[in-house]
Image (cartoon, rainbow, N blue to C red):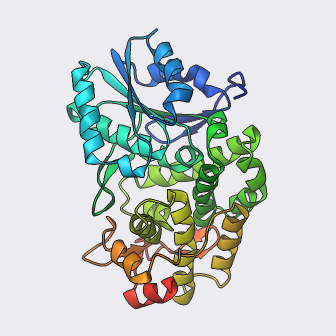
Amino acid sequence: MTHTAAQAPRSVDAGSYLVRIAAGLRDQFASQIVAAAPAYRYAVISDVNVAPHYADALVKSLRAHGRASLHVVPAGEQHKTRATWARLTDDLLADGCGRDTTVVALGGGVVGDLAGFVAATFMRGIPVVQCPTTLLAMIDASVGGKTGVDTASGKNLVGSFHPPAAVLADVETTRTLPLAHRRAGLAEAIKHGAIADSAYFRAVHDACAAILDSDPSATLDVVERSVQIKAAIVRDDPRERGKRKTLNFGHTLGHAIEHASGYTLLHGECVAIGMVLETRIAERLGIAQQGTAAAIAAALTQAGLPVDRPAYLVPPAVLSATRLDKKAQAGAVEYALPRRIGMMFDGDGVWSLPVDDALVLEVLA
């Protein structure tokens, strides 16, 4: 791939750490990692898709600052498990890693969640630096400190809040992504506009073609604004007791669809469908302005994302999967719902509400 000389990165304050974004930033990964989380050892965790592109250069550059090792896992959500976590922690122990180690997550959301959970639990917690290589991970998954693994019962049910020491995003890495994965990343950008910034929602809609073509300038702009939106929310509510729940818009039904599909659908595709369905629920409850679901569906369609429940996933199976959602309270499944583009239902500071099963089934059907 064509390589751009690294420019001065754009920085977003995420509270206890900075998110740095630039085209060509991978040239600076080692120096930035060492500055943010100096260590005796660096354990780079990547997957079989990403490692061949970027891992060797990163490990070599880190070895100028200390010992460095590479740990490669299979790609895909189906491998984000306790078994993979156990293998990685055993590998770190076999390599002699201790509390003087920094974990480096080099990959997409699965790698980021896994590596973050390894760092959160290894020796009761060591630093992690997130180096996201997918649009979805840059925009959303690498920011906020959520780490974890999936279980047979559901997604992200075992995990920890463990903020990174830094997030380093080189937007050039999106060029090696399949088009479907770029589209999936745009789902989270559209979500950020829908929950917090109507002007940004329109900007993402207008820039879809350029972002899907991995245009560096357009990608920089969308990553920066999405990170700003998410970071501001997380700074105010790091443990998801209030407004941070709005970031779950589209995810209650989205995660249920993802689980019911056996993870054959991409996360962003499921969130796209979930946003449309959940907004239809909000319209039927009289919470959302009429036409909001249609506006979200139009933006997602522009990005080439699905907006309807796959026919092979029957509504009762999807509803049943929502019961596994980690956000359920007292047996009731909660939903973060929009009022209109750019504004979410606050529920007197609760930011989510339970929805009757009959209405969920009606919308799913």
Q: Residue at x 44, y 77 (%)?
A: 347
Count of marks, rendered view: 0
Q: Nearer the viewer, residue 300 or 164?
A: 300
- Quadrant, the N terminus: top right
Task: State left or right for residue 210 relative to residue 254.
Answer: right
As displayed, is residue 292 above or below residue 8? below
Image position, residue 66 (x, y; %):
38, 11
Q: Nearer the viewer, residue 120 or 92?
A: 92
Q: Nearer the viewer, residue 93 or 221?
A: 93
Q: Name, please, the residue furthest toward the front.
A: 312
As displayed, is residue 161 above or below residue 54? below
Image position, residue 105 (x, y; %):
43, 34
Image position, residue 235 (x, y; %):
46, 49
- Residue 125 in view in this figure: no
**Quadrant of the image occupied by residue 54:** top right
As displayed, is residue 130 above or below residue 317? above
Task: State left or right for residue 206 relative to residue 65.
Answer: right
Q: Residue at x 38, y 83 (%)?
A: 316
Q: Residue at x 58, y 39 (%)?
A: 12
- Residue 106 in view in this figure: yes
**Quadrant of the image occupied by residue 220:** top right
Image position, residue 230 (x, y; %):
53, 52
Q: Residue at x 24, y 39 (%)?
A: 86
Task: State left or right for residue 44 relative to residue 276.
Answer: left
